[in-house]
Image (cartoon, rainbow, N blue to C red):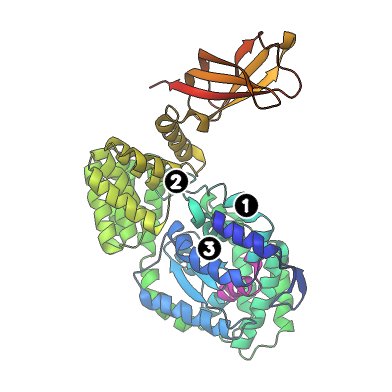
Amino acid sequence: MLRLFTVLLLAALSVGCAVNPVTGEQQLMFVPESQDAQIGQSQYKPAQQSQGGLYYLDPELTLYVASVGKKLAAVSDRPDLPYEFVILNNSVPNAWALPSGKIALNRGLLVKLKDEAQLAAVLSHEIVHAAARHSAQRIQQGMIVQYGMMGLGMAVEGTDYKDLIIGGATMGASLTMAQYSQEHELESDKYGMKYMAKAGYDLNAAVELQQLFVEMSKNQQSNWLQGLFASHPPSPSRVEANQDHVSRFASTGNYRGKAEFQKHMKYLLSKTDAYRSQDKAAALIAKKDFSSAMTEINKAIKSEPNEALFYATKGDIYSAQGKDSLAVKQYEKSVSLFPEQFSSYLKKGISNEKLGNYEQAKKDFSRSAQLLPTSVAALGLGNIAQLQGNQRDAIRHFEQAAQAQGDNGKSARIKLAKLELPNNPEKYIKIKHKLGKNRALQAYAENHSEISVIEVEIESTVVNPAGQTVSTKRWSIKQNIKPRTRSRLVNDPVVETLTEGYQVRSKILSASIVK
């Protein structure tokens, strides 16, 4: 993540005004276009992982969506971009685009659409976001610093994990969730309809789509706030603007493609009740109504026995009840059906760690981290390494987990400090000095760790302007220095030689913590 920011910062020194590839207007752009492909390629799969993973049960549907997307991309202002289109296994109605044309559409949005023309309205809108480099503009406006560097606060369905993603993968997830400006949304609506017209679609579909979004936003569920309406806020003004565009752009046809769309959607729509039961089960787990949740998820599995998500949710129910042996079996079933989703490995690792199956838990956490680096996996690997007496690996994993905010990051920082502070106290405790009343030397300890220090031994040396040692003293102080606080340790009146040009240098010889 830091390396990528460094590249972007250095590039910013040589990049200034640029032409918007879609509008043709001059705009201030500090992120060079050469970085778009790198960002899109590196962040596409992690972003998919963080939002449900691929919908894999109907590959023909994915090919169909991609064919519509490529038809629109071909008539766009940037047909040369390496476009990709995927469907995500997520019930939240949402769609997003990363730089260089990496586009995703949630299962939950697809089922809200009526025909291919409405699908084209969604995809053309996202194509404009990519072609006009809207994500690059959000990066330079500081969004990535605000969201990516903090660690993204997210939840894996059925759990209460927070601030889950660590490292560079936070960038893609942040870009998919951060809100576009009104200017960018109107621009994407306008030029998206221009692309629809060139491809022969009925432009009224774009008006209907915005009307649908406005209606849905009135009764939106709380989790939708992290979806479409967070990143693409609908409004009546966008409906009106789209109505104006209908007469402005002359379409080469009025294709709706209802029959074609419904043909490709037939399988997914036949499983509507199954996914509705899955969503109910996840909500019931949060309410700790495990019996009802089990009833719902069993309905889902009966309707669609090949959906990995359903078995993972069943594992969540068992895990929440402390039945980790049963949970592991469900997560294993989930992995066997779809071995490319991080969350099933992550949850399996957590249950195996609880059961004391440490070697298997290590494999689970490692595979999960390969697919999406998370503080949960890093923390689990650190715990196991510590239990097995491998302090070096434990420190390495805790350092990774410590990047996160929230409970996971704090837990990792506590564990890391307990391992390191007694042997390397100066990494966590800083000694500051000042001259008090009657020329008394005052030494203060700043505890930068997350744990209390109960005893320190320090050595202070007074050095004259020539660099010669004038005096050296040691103090052993028993005092509770609380986490993230500053405490006065020494108030020594015998420093008569401390005049202008003299320096005091202190080092910590040892430190003790509560075991």
Q: Is residue 429 above or below residue 280?
A: above
348 to 356, vertically: above or below: below
Q: Which residue is mark 3?
A: 94
Magenta region: which residues? 121-135
- Residue sitting at x 53%, y 63%: 94
Q: Does 493 sit above or below residue 406? A: above
Residue 354 located within the stretch drawn in magenta: no
Q: Secondary structure at mark 1?
A: helix
**Most foreground residue, 495 or 68:** 495
Report if residue 124 lies within the magenta region: yes
Q: Which residue is denoted by mark 1 in the rendering?
A: 145
Residue 177 lies, in percent from the top left, at: 57, 57
Q: Amino acid at mark 2?
A: Gln
Separation (CA) of disc 2 from disc 1: 18 Å
How far across and down, in percent of the image, does residue 126 sit? Answer: 59, 71
From the viewer's side, name the closer residue of 249 and 257: 249
In this picture, residue 264 sits left or right of residue 6: left
- Report if residue 356 is visible in the image: yes
Answer left or right for 456 relative to 343. right
